């Protein structure tokens, strides 16, 4: 199975005007990696999900996500946003943005991985390790090891 | 404390699991055990019944309809939505702890009411449906708890016949065999244990087969009380059980049969239901579920059964018996048809019993006089037994031919009905008749009328009061006798299928949905 996240999908110092911009920049990374076929279509799906309920999570996390037919393999785009970007969380702007892209169909295997990722997100140590990581490669390998390792 | 939680969200890939993790972590931090069922897109791994049973409270952090919510019924709960659980795990846990602490303490009326709502024995009752559907669900709840009693009792009785051979009938029902006279130890079991009768007597007279038979009769005796009790349970939850079961026992003792049991079940359910909704002073509330409701509901239902149901039935029984005796001189075939209609009407109830007793009494007299030539009394006995065999056999055939019209439980009961019918255990058809009285009772009546008429036409004679296929050696012209039963069986099954098919798609979907509720794969 293709890794959920690779070095190319990590942005260490993202500068974004708002959550739409942040999401678009990460989605472009997924498209460049061939994981998203139609950028606009995918962003529309993410926006539709975002409209249901803001995905800002406590602990400075933005979690835009969607199951979309424009996604070929389950993927995670990850950005550190030192300046923060508002994802509608009550406790302030997000400094970590996780863009989860899941194919519309498919079996439950990748969904299990995404479930594992979602569980990790609420653990402070998981977030801190990502923030403290020296480079994109170590962020990718850490996250992949955490969620794919089980 | 122990908690169970359900999490879900629209997409089912993020919040569901974040909320789950958050609740588990927050619970651990506060010293509570939290087990979460994530109803997300990765599939749902259901919490085990043990975990749910052990939980003090329930947390719903679900933005979608909770699947299987009935499993948690009766426990204190909080419903917070998934977002709250993601953002404020400790707050949710604190609220859940408060909900458990504020829940009624054990021993109070409120706690008893909640316990009554707890899963316990399941009912088939769902909320927010029309009254007709509810009546059906109440009926089906009673029937589903009754079916195992029919199977256990009926098969034990059949085994008694099987191991005891045709002698065991005489030994159990009384009569003279090889110069020895036996007392009737079978009728009225177990409510009226015959004078001087005991298990030693049965064992010495009829052996192990007699004991099996006796066990079967005792199981059968519980059939109507269980039917009645669980109809009342379905209507009124736990408070319905006591008046329902006592009312059902009275229906049995008064000879009111399963139709009487239906009446007592609905009466008991209604009484208990309204009693639980009476507003009473706080001081009395504690003793309502354990003393007041059982006491008053049993008095009300008991008096109702004795005076409103029992008296007319006793009068009707006397009248019917006299009427039958007056008919003795009429055409044999007409008498056979009338007896068949009676046998097929209430399947072991009062009218069936009148026909049977009429035949059995005639048999006793005829055997005692030992006259030669054709004996009408022996023909009547043969007609009555055959007409009591076709109802369960008809059910067995109908479930085998058109299984989709019936629930899994009914199909299983249909299998047992082959044996029950062959053993002249008419009660085997009761679960069908109780569940669909307006369709089954006409079918069994017509089928039994055909059987009874044919036996009288063929002139078969029977020299035993019971035993079905196991006393075929005591039947004259046995092949014609079996033919009469077979024709009656086919008629019963054909009419059952016809009437059940009048609304076939609905009947099938109801049967299928009840299978799903029962956890049976359709």
Image (cartoon, coloured by chain):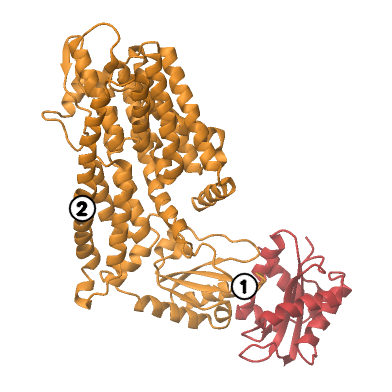
Chain colours: A red, B orange
Question: Where residue B9 is drawn, which disc sits there?
Answer: 1
Calculate the distance from the C-alpha at mark 2 to the C-alpha at mark 1: 52 Å
The earlier-in-sequence mark between 2 and 1 is: 1
* Mark 2 chain: B
**Residue at the image position 21 percent from the left and 33 percent from the top:** B188
Picture quadrant where residue B74 is located? bottom left
Q: Is residue A2 left or right of residue B264?
A: right
Secondary structure of the residue carrying tag 2 is helix
Position of residue A56 relative to residue B274, above or below, is below
**Residue at the image position 51 percent from the left and 40 percent from the top:** B499
Residue furthest to the left in view is: B196
Position of residue B416 relative to residue B503, above or below, is above
Q: Position of residue B477 (x, y in %)?
A: 40, 10
Question: Viewer-nearest of labels 2 and 1?
Answer: 2
Which residue is disc 2 drawn over?
A: B302
Q: Position of residue B30 (x, y in %)?
A: 45, 78
Q: Can residue A50 be seen from the camera position used here?
A: yes
Q: Nearer the viewer, residue B216 or B501?
A: B501
**Residue at the image position 34 percent from the left and 56 percent from the top:** B233
Picture quadrant where residue B168 is located? top left
Question: Where residue B402 is drawn, which disc sits there?
Answer: none
Q: Can residue B206 be seen from the camera position used here?
A: no
Q: Position of residue B85 (x, y in %)?
A: 55, 78
Position of residue B386 relative to residue B193, above or below, is above
Q: Nearer the viewer, residue B510 or B446?
A: B446
Q: Is residue B33 left or right of residue A64?
A: left
Secondary structure of the residue carrying tag 1 is loop
């Amino acid at each position: 199975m293709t890794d959920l996240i690779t070095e190319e999908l990590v942005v260490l110092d993202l500068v974004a005007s708002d959550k739409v911009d942040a999401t678009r920049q990460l989605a472009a990374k997924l498209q460049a990696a061939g994981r998203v076929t139609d950028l606009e279509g995918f962003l529309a799906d993410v926006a539709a999900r975002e409209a249901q309920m803001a995905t800002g999570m406590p602990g400075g996390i933005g979690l835009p996500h969607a199951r979309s037919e424009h996604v070929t393999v389950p993927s995670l785009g990850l950005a550190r946003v030192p300046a923060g970007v508002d994802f509608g969380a009550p406790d302030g702007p997000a400094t970590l943005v996780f863009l989860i892209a899941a194919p519309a169909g498919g079996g439950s295997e990748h969904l299990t991985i995404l479930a594992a990722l979602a569980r990790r997100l609420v653990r402070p140590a998981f977030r801190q390790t990502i923030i403290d990581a020296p480079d994109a490669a170590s962020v990718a390998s850490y996250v992949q090891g955490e969620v794919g390792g089980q | 404390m122990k908690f169970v939680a359900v999490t879900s969200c629209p997409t089912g890939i993020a919040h569901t699991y974040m909320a789950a993790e958050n609740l588990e972590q927050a619970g651990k931090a506060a010293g509570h055990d939290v087990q979460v069922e994530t109803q997300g897109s990765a599939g749902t791994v259901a919490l085990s019944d043990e975990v749910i049973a052990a939980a003090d409270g329930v947390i719903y952090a679900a933005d979608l309809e909770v699947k299987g919510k009935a499993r948690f019924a009766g426990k204190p709960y909080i419903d917070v939505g998934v977002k709250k659980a993601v953002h404020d795990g400790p707050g949710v846990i604190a609220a859940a702890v408060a909900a458990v602490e504020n829940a009624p303490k054990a021993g109070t009326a409120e706690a008893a009411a909640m316990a009554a709502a707890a899963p316990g024995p399941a009912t088939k009752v769902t909320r927010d449906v029309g009254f007709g559907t509810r009546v059906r669900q109440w009926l089906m709840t009673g029937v589903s708890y009754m079916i195992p009693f029919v199977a256990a009792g009926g098969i034990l009785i059949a085994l008694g016949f099987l191991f005891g051979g045709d002698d065991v009938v005489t030994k159990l029902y009384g009569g003279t065999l090889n110069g020895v006279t036996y007392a009737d130890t079978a009728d009225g079991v177990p409510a009226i244990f015959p004078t001087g009768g005991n298990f030693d007597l049965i064992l010495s007279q009829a052996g192990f087969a007699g004991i099996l038979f006796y066990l079967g009769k005792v199981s059968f005796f519980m059939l109507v009380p269980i039917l009645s009790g669980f109809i009342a349970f379905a209507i009124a939850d736990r408070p319905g059980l006591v008046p329902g079961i006592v009312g059902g026992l009275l229906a049995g003792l008064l000879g009111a049969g399963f139709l009487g049991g239906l009446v007592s079940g609905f009466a008991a359910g209604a009484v208990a239901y309204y009693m639980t909704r009476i507003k009473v002073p706080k001081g009395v509330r504690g003793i309502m579920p354990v003393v007041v409701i059982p006491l008053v509901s049993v008095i009300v239902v008991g008096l109702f059964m004795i005076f409103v149901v029992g008296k007319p039935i006793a009068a009707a029984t006397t009248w019917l018996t006299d009427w039958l005796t007056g008919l003795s001189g009429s055409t044999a075939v007409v008498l056979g048809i009338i007896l068949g209609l009676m046998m097929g009407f209430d399947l072991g109830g009062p009218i069936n019993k009148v026909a049977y007793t009429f035949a059995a009494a005639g048999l006793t007299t005829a055997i005692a006089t030992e006259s030669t030539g054709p004996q009408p009394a022996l023909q009547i006995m043969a007609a009555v037994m055959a007409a009591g065999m076709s109802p369960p056999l008809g059910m067995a055939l109908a479930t085998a031919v058109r299984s989709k019209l019936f629930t899994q439980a009914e199909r299983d009961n249909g299998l047992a009905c082959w044996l029950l019918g062959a053993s002249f255990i008419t009660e085997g058809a009761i679960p069908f008749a109780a569940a669909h009285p307006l369709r089954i009772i006409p079918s069994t009546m017509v089928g039994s009328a055909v059987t009874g008429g044919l036996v009288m036409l063929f002139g078969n004679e029977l020299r035993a009061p019971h035993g079905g296929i196991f006393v075929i050696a005591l039947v004259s012209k046995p092949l014609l006798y079996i033919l009469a039963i077979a024709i009656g069986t086919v008629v019963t099954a054909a009419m059952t299928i016809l009437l059940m098919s009048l609304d076939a798609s609905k009947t099938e979907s109801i049967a299928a949905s009840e299978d799903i509720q029962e956890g049976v794969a359709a």
